[in-house]
Image: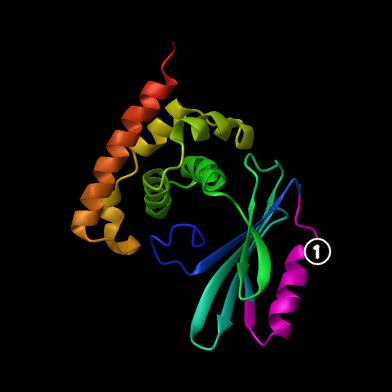
Amino acid sequence: MGFHLKHRTTKDLDLFWHERQQLGSLPQETQARLTAEGLEVTAVQTSPTFHRLRVKDGPEVCIVDLVAEPVSAVHRPQTVEIQGVSITVDSPQEILVNKLCTLLSRSEVRDLVDVRALLESGADLKGALADAPRKDAGFSPLVLAWVLRDLRPRPLAEAAGLSEAEAEDLDRFREKLISVLLEAGAPE
């Protein structure tokens, strides 16, 4: 998201390896490379498919998530150049598909903020709803609507750094999204 929209600040970096069942030695290799650059690295959460690192450079801290994603990308990634280095970044449409699936599992305000920003920037919700089951077999618009029904942005606003007005606006977006999801999931 930080490469495409820059709509919110973040102190995390998500690195995905598509078509990989497990991370294998990638967490150890990543930690060794970061440490070799003089950074302080602490493993915060580990599993065969997910590894969270806390990376510290003096007073600056960044969370780095390493993720083995067993399915392939639905949309072709983009190559961007940053300070003379080419890296591969998921397209905004791919990120929207992932964010919709993520809302099913963790339903955090920041994910709802991201979905809204992606849709406002022109991402295709209808296409993403059709693509999401390729990433998560349990995904459906109706299930997502049911999950979003219980997400309340207003009480979480302060923790997410939102003002009361932003929380109200996000809650209106959530209600509108639920309506769209219910319509998309209705039998024809």
Whether residue 70 is situated above or below residue 63 in the rendered picture: above
As helix, strand or loop, the secondary structure at mark 1 comes to: loop
Q: Is residue 83 above or below residue 3?
A: below
Query: Residue 82 at x, y = what percent?
Result: 60, 71
Q: Residue furthest right?
A: 25
In magenta stretch: residue 35: yes
Q: Nearer the viewer, residue 140 or 152?
A: 140
Residue drawn at x 56%, y 65% as measured from the top left: 13
Tell me if mark 1 has few (under 14), some (14-19) or many (20+) residues whose alpha carbon lies within 10 angstroms of its own: few
Tell me the residue that label 1 is attached to. 25
Q: Quadrant of residue 34?
A: bottom right
Q: Is residue 70 above or below residue 110?
A: above
At which x and y percent is residue 23?
75, 57
Q: Residue 134, percent across and down? A: 63, 33
Please give left or right for residue 26 compared with residue 178 in the image: right
Q: Quadrant of the C terminus?
A: top left
Q: Which residue is depicted at the point 37% across and 22% down? A: 183
Residue sitting farthest toward the left = 165
Residue at the image position 46 percent from the left and 30 percent from the top: 126
Task: Give percent across and percent down for residue 109.
Answer: 37, 52
Q: Residue at x 76, y 48 (%)?
A: 20
Residue 89 visible somewhere in the drawing: yes
> Is 127 situated above or below 172?
above
Residue 77 colored in magenta in the image:
no
Is residue 138 at least partly visible in the picture? no
The amino acid pointed to by label 1 is: Ser
Front residue of 110/6: it is 6
> Is 178 positioned to the left or the right of 125 in the image?
left
Which range of residues does the magenta coloring cover?
22-41
- Colour basis: rainbow
